[in-house]
Image (cartoon, coloured by chain):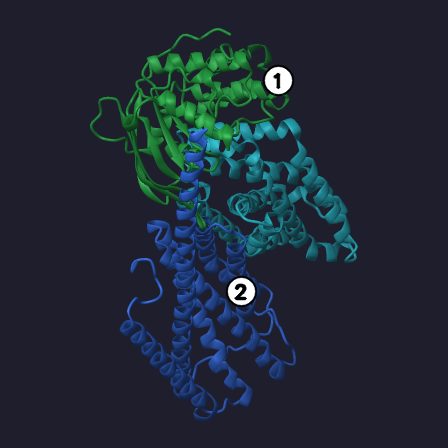
Chain colours: A cyan, B green, C blue
Amino acid sequence: MALARPAAVLLGKELQTEFRTRELLTTTVVFVLMVLVLFSFTFDPTSIESRRFAPGLLWLTLLFAGSLMLHPSFTREQTNDTLAALRLAPIDPTAILAAKILANACFLLVAEAVLLPIFAALYNLHVWPVLGRMCVVLILGTLALATIGTVFSAISSQARMRELLLPLLLMPVLTPALIASAEATAGLFDDPAYLSPQWVGLLAGFDAIFLTVTWLFGEYLLEE
Amino acid sequence: MAIASQTNSSHGVTVEFQNIEKRYGVRYALHGVSLRIEAGECVALVGANGSGKTTLLRVASLLVRPSAGRVNFWETGDAHPLADPIAVKQRIGMVAHQILLYDDLTAEENLELFAKLYGLDRPKDRAAAALEPAGLLSRRNDPVRDFSRGMRQRLAIARALLPAPGLLLLDEPATGLDPAGQHWLGEILARLHSSGCTILMSTHGLSEVHSVVSRAVRLAAGCLAEDSAHSGDPQRMLAAALAAEQGA
Amino acid sequence: MSTLSASVPSDRGALTRAHSANFIETLLVALLLGAAGYCALFVAPTERTMGVIQRIFYFHVPSWWSAFVAFAIVLVSNLAYLRGRNPKWDWLGVSAAEVGVAFVTVGLVTGPIWAHPVWGIWWTWDARLTSAFVLWVLYVSYLLLRNLIEEPERRAVVSAVFGIFAAVDIPLVYFSIWFFRTQHPQPVIGDGGSLDSQMARVLLLCWAAMLGILVLMIRQRYRVEALRWDVDRLRLTAAQSASELSARQGFAMGEGQ
C-alpha cells in the first residue's frame, strides 16, 4: 500500500530519533509523576476514595502530559525545514501524519508503562489482576490522544500562541474519549472488576472515526 | 573530490508555469508568471531579494500551492503531462534555503532515510555512494548537527541528487560553499546538464556555477521582468543582475 | 472594476434595492420576534408545576435548535471550502460559527436562570447542559484558532479542518455525556415529558423567530467578511503596483552603473 511503506519508514525515523535522546519520554514521565503526587494532596488517598477519584485523575494527567508532549511533533520539523523535505518526497502526505500518530502513541504507551506501577502504588490500587483489560483501555485511550493530539499539533504549529492553543483545542474534542477511558478504568477497580463493553465500544468507535477523518482531511494541514 | 559515475541518465522533465499567482495576505509573492522550461535547459533565476525566486522554486517543487494558475510537467517525449503529483515528485530534486536534513541523525542515516522514501533499492549503498563524491564519507557516522556550514550544504546537494532527478531545483546553492565546493557544484551541474537533466537555479551571481547556464530569467516584484530567450544573452543578464545587487 | 467588489453593488439602483430589502427583512424578523414574545408570555398556558418561570423554555429550547442549525451550516461551509477553495464558504463558516456561539451562550445563560427558582441551584451538570458547555468551548476554540492565524488562505484551510473534527465530535460528546449521566444521575433541567399542543405551537413560533434572527445575523456578518476581502484586495493591488514601479526604477538605476 502506498501509505504503509513510507509510514513505516517514517515511524522508524521518529522512534530512532526519540530513543536516541529520550528527552520527550523523561520529561513526560517526570511531569506525570509530579501531577499525581500533587493530586494526592487534594483528597484522602484511602482505598475507597482512591477508587472513586484515581481513574479520572490518571486520564486527566495523561491528557495534560499529552498536550505538552505532542506539541514538538510538528514544531521539531520546523528546524532545517525538514517537513518540506518529507513533503518533497514522492509519498502520500497522510503517511507523514500516520507515522507521527503511531510514534506518539508508542511514546505515550512507554510513559504509561513506567507510570502504571507507580500510580497503583501511590493510590493503593490492585492493577495486577486486571492488567490485561487495563491494557486494552490504555491502548484505545492512548490512540485517541495520539490521533487528535498529532493532528492538532499540526494545526497549532501554524498559529501563534501555539503552546497554549494545543491544550485548548485538544480538551473539548477529547471529552468523549476522556469520559470513556476514565469510566472504563473505574469499572476495572470496582468490586467485582468488570470491563464495560459500552465504554470500550465508544473508545474504539472514537478512534475509528477520527482516524478516518484524519485520513480524509489531514493532508490539507500539510500544505503551504 | 571525485565525480561519481552516473548510475542512470536522467532524461529531463519539461516544466510549464501557467499564469501563476501566489498571495500571502495583502502581498503578492508571484503575480501572473508564465514560463516554459524545456527538458534539458539550464535556467538561471535572478532578481532582487523578495522578487519571488524562492516562491517560484517552491511552486515548481509542489511544496507551495499557487493561489491561481497551474504548473504542468512532461517527461521527455510524452504528449500528456504527468497527472499524479507523487509521480512528479519522484522526478524532482531540490536544494532549498534550509538544508532539509535532520540534525539528530547522522549523514548516512539522513541519506538512507530519503533513499527509502524515494523508493530506491539498496538504500544503504546508495547513501554511501552519494556521500563519497561530496567528500563526506569520512564523516558518515557524525550527526549533521556537528557539520560545518559548507559540509551541511554539500550534504543537502547530495540529498537532492539521490533520486537521479529529471528536474533539479536549486535555491542559491553556492551559499556556504568554499571555492572547492563551488567547483564541485559546477562540475555536477555540467554533468547533469550534459545528461539531459532540466535545471532551474536561483543565483546571486557567483560565476563558478554560471558556465552551464543556457538561459536567464529575471523576476521583479513577483512578475516576470526579463527572459533571455526573448532578449538575448543570458551571461549579460547575469552580469547585470550581479551589478544591480552590488549597486543596490 | 465591477468584479473587484464582492460586497457592494456597483450601481446606485442596486444599492438602494439592497438597502430596502435589508430593511424589510429586519422588520419582518422584528415582527415575528414580537409575536413570539407575546405568545410566549401571554398566550401559552401556564405550566402546572413550575409556574411563570417555565416560559423561559420557549427561548431556552429553540436557542439549542438554532445553534445546531448554525453549526450544521459551519460543517457544510468547511467541507465546501476544502473542496473548491472559494473564499465565500470561509466567510459563511465564520459567520455561522459566531452566530452559533451566540445562541449556545443564550442557552447556557437561560438554563441556570430557569433552574435557580425551580431547584434552588444554578448548575446541575445535567447531560444537555454539560454537552452544551463543551459545544460552546469547541466553537469558541474554532474562533480563537482563526484569530491566531494571520494569513487568510492558511486560516481558512486550517480552521476548516478543525471545524470538521469539531462537528464530527459533537454527537460523540452528546452520547458520552448522556451515557455518563445514566450511570451517575443528576437533576435534569427542562425535561417535561409530553408537550401540550398549544405549548408546542408557541414553541415552534419562537423557533421560527429565532431562525429569522439567525439568518439575519449570519447575513450581516457575511457582509462584513466580504467587505474585509474587498479592502484586502484593494491593498493588494496598490501594494503590487507600488512594488512593480520601484522594482523597475531600481533596476534601471543599477544598470546605469
Marks 2/1: CA–CA distance? 51 Å
Q: For mark 1, what is the residue?
A: B142
Q: Residue at x 62, y 24 (%)?
A: B145
Residue C50 visible in the snapshot: no
What x and y, as percent, mark residue A155?
Answer: 51, 47
Q: For mark 2, what is the residue?
A: C136
Nearer the camera: disc 2 or disc 1: 1
Chain ID for label 2? C
Find numbered disc 2 in the image and state the secondary structure of the residue it sits on.
Answer: helix
Q: Is B232 on the left-hand or right-hand side of C172?
A: left
Q: Residue at x 48, y 90 (%)?
A: C41
Q: Residue at x 30, y 58 (%)?
A: C1
Q: Is A35 on the left-hand or right-hand side of B184?
A: right
Q: Residue furthest left?
A: B79
Which of the 4 image quadrants contains residue B146?
top right
Which of the 4 image quadrants contains residue C200?
bottom left
> Are the residues tagged 2 and 1 within 8 Å (C-beta)?
no
Let me know if marks 2 and 1 both belong to one chain: no
Q: Is B125 on the left-hand or right-hand side of A189?
A: left
Query: What amino acid is at disc 2?
Result: Trp
